[in-house]
Amino acid sequence: MTTRRWAAGHREGRGSEPPDGERRGVRVAAGHSPPRGGPSRPAPGLRRPPPTLFDVRGEGTESGGSRGERAGARRGGAGSPSPGAPSRAGPRGGGSRAAEQGGRARAGGRRRAGRGGPWSEPNARAAPRDSSREEEISWEAPAEKKAECIQKGKSNQTECFNFIRFLQPYNTSHLYVCGTYAFQPKCTYIDMLTFTLERGEFEDGKGKCPYDPAKGHTGLLVDGELYSATFNNFLGTEPVILRNMGPHHAMKTEYLAFWLNEPHFVGSAYVPESVGSFTGDDDKVYFFFSERAVEYDCYAEQVVARVARVCKGDVGGARTLQRKWTTFLKARLVCSAPDWQLYFNQLQALHTLLDASWHNTTFFGVFRARWGDVDLSAVCEYQLEEIQRVFEGPYKEYHEQAQKWGRYTDPVPSPRPGSCINNWHRRHGYTSSLELPDNTLNFIKKHPLMEEQVDPRWGRPLLVKKDTNFTHLVADRVVGLDGATYTVLFIGTGDGWVLKAVSLGPWVHLIEELQVFDQEPVESLVLSQSKQKLLFAGSRSQLVQLPLADCVKYRSCADCVLARDPYCAWSVNTSRCVAVGGHSGSLLIQHVTVSDTSSICNFRGSKKVRLTPKNITVVAGTDLVLPCRLSSNLAHARWTFGGRDLPAEQPGSFLYDARLQALVVMAAQPRHAGAYHCFSEEQGARLAAEGYLVAVVAGPSVTLEARAPLENLGLVWLAVVALGAVCLVLLLLVLSLRRRLREELEKGAKAAERTLVYPLELPKEPTSPPFRPGPETDEKLWDPVGYYYSDGSLKIVPGHARCQAGGGPPSPPPGIPGQPLPSPTRLHLGGGRNSNANGYVRLQLGGEDRGGLGHPLPELADELRRKLQQRQPLPDSNPEESSV
């Protein structure tokens, strides 16, 4: 596995090697036929199996091994909100859920993999942490279900499989799992004691899991009730936020565009707001998604991020909103940097960071946007108190007269629409949502959108990074040595990196960037809350386990302190960088907010890292490149030559290449021989990075380089003459071929000229007047006066057919009985012959237009005269045919 970021002091190609069991990849494989059988409700108190990790893969895919064993890392810097500035971390090159309680792990989820599609056919494999025994659960859609899916027009390569979309603990002994089941969603249970799928009839998954594996989905189980945000039909046109299972009847949203308009569901969170509430408030479930906005006056389809909430005790209305949410409210979630006119509207992922008190609940959202032709990703932080304030504010409504959305200014009905049942409602006789008046329910049915928007904490994003696609995020709280609580973020990217950053007020400090997958997106991130805190990162085919505190990579006091990692501190007793939790009896040094190590690490007994210089011998006149690998992306290289500082650039002698991170000695001479040392300088601390002893010699190659042209001069001239002769022969050959080609073309042109047929063209006559049918004719299309002479003979009227504008002459239409034929445009006499005794002359009509050649008309007249003499005259009283 190649890496592009390195831990401080690590050599290229290797990262820190954790102890056995700390970092492990979980293999995955294709499964077997689906088991059958129904779920059995387990009795509480059943023992759970040993800690296991579940991964999901598609059919026919190869097993994956560990990807974290050689993951490279490098300490980064502070995140900058400016999209134009380069990242201070330097250049680089649906989510699984897990819960650990009492040291037992439960993990699972979805993987976008397999079969060329965005998701995978579910095949779960368990890898017990301390056992080599491997277990596997396979739950596939049967062949008949796949055939029905294909008949409905879905793909047999990417869609007609059973994609796991929901997997969460149901109780202490069972997991609840739902899959698309070839566009026929099904749900069932997994017994954690035996690690088997419950046999029997599967439950209907409609409303619990989407039909389409590519549609957004989120859900959670709260006290045996499933809250899900999904699509409720085969076509994916009915978005719904639904509650089913448990003691209450099913509840869902209205199918109205101003409730949900083509949403993409991302995440959900349960907040127990009834605990310690002075107002007797109810618990709430929050949903986060993106959707098409209906409130903006613009022609473009604008997508915005939303947060919506429902109350846990909501049971719908009595007459209005029966079995529909009466507490559904939603508001816009804003993540923007107004100073740079950046607005992030596409919500990618969301993480809920709970606290001992629900009042301190924090939400972290991952957003994406485009700024010109640059892709940007951002992380915004939101406080629960800010969301509550917006939901208690004014409503937004659609003004019919103005035909636009605006603030609702009329009096609000009482009780307040959308609010949960609390002590105020109980004092006024409303103990359930079924008792709410119709005016309150009708109001909330038409006004679920709030006027104000939820702004991020600090008024701007915590982190903005360009040319990077953030995919997932998890957060952890850790207490530093100073007693302060710090929030550490772990952010997955689309190219297989995990960013570790610490939040320091309105900005973040990027601690390190770790590559865990080779150009595979990080599809899921899960934090373990056991004693040994771990981070699980999942991709399409792999699962990697990483320790949160990886302090061994920091080699010196300055390096350890400059990292500003809340999990690590410098031990004065052992002169090592150690994890804070495991060395409580040692004298530790840690400064997360202060990075000046000039006084922190300047104590007696501190060890300095010494490097053995490398011996390098070069030939005079060659360019010498001396690499210097810095300990951090925030550090700068400082070089010394012979104990004296070298300038950043000395024309003609020295040049520092920041891209190569190396000092270039141009055309090395004997005066450039000596000792070179590179130091990594950051925040006043100077760490030795590299050392070189350079020797410059004048080798014999310099003399050979000057003699070589003189000794081989004769051979050079011979080669030049031979090359000139070859070029001359090629030139003559080309001229000969060109001449022969010209002669062939001239012969072909003469032959074509002899075969041309030149027609005779009659002089143009004025066009005949428009035809008007006479009153005596039956068909009203024949005028005998205009087409017969007085003796009964037929007139031949010269003329031309009319052409349509902009085109050539049209082809003559088929003859109509009783209608005169159109006048010919060309007359060819070469085909004239005697047809019978009546002396008919056959005139050949042609419509081709060839260039006029000016043939004389006397030849035409002689031909006509000769034909007329051969004709026998007809009686004038009763002419049988027309005369020419």
Image (cartoon, rainbow, N blue to C red):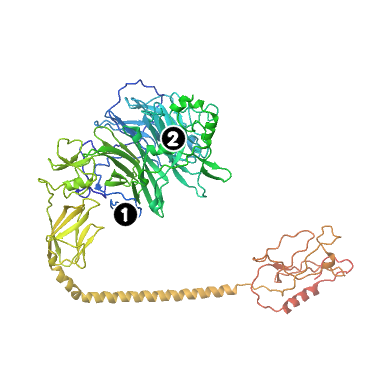
Q: Residue pushed farthest left?
A: 605
Nearest to the eye among marks 1 and 2: give it.
2
Residue 719 x/y as whole percent? 26, 74
Q: Do residues under tags 1 and 2 come within 8 Å of each other at their CB atoms?
A: no
Q: Residue pushed farthest top?
A: 43
Which residue matches tag 1? 86
Which residue matches tag 2? 309
Residue 803 x/y as whole percent? 68, 66
Side of 123 where 483 appears, left or right: left
* 458 or 580, nearer to the observer: 458
* Depicted 381 relative to depicted 206: above or below: below
Residue 639 x/y as whole percent? 17, 59
Query: What's under tag 1, amino acid-wise?
Result: Pro
* Depicted 368 relative to depicted 673: above or below: above
Side of 683 where 86 appears, left or right: right
Query: What's under tag 2, amino acid-wise?
Result: Arg
Q: Quadrant of the C terminus?
A: bottom right
* 881 or 533, nearer to the observer: 533
The reply to whether residue 210 is in sight is: no
Give the label on residue 219, or none: none
Q: Residue pushed farthest right?
A: 877
Earlier residue among tags 1 and 2 = 1
The reply to whether residue 407 is in sight is: yes
Looking at the rendered structure, the secondary structure element under dot 1 is loop
Distance from Cα at disc 1 to Cα at disc 2:
38 Å
* 265 or 713, nearer to the observer: 265
Pointer 1 local density, CA inside 10 Å: few below 14, some 14–19, many at least 20: few
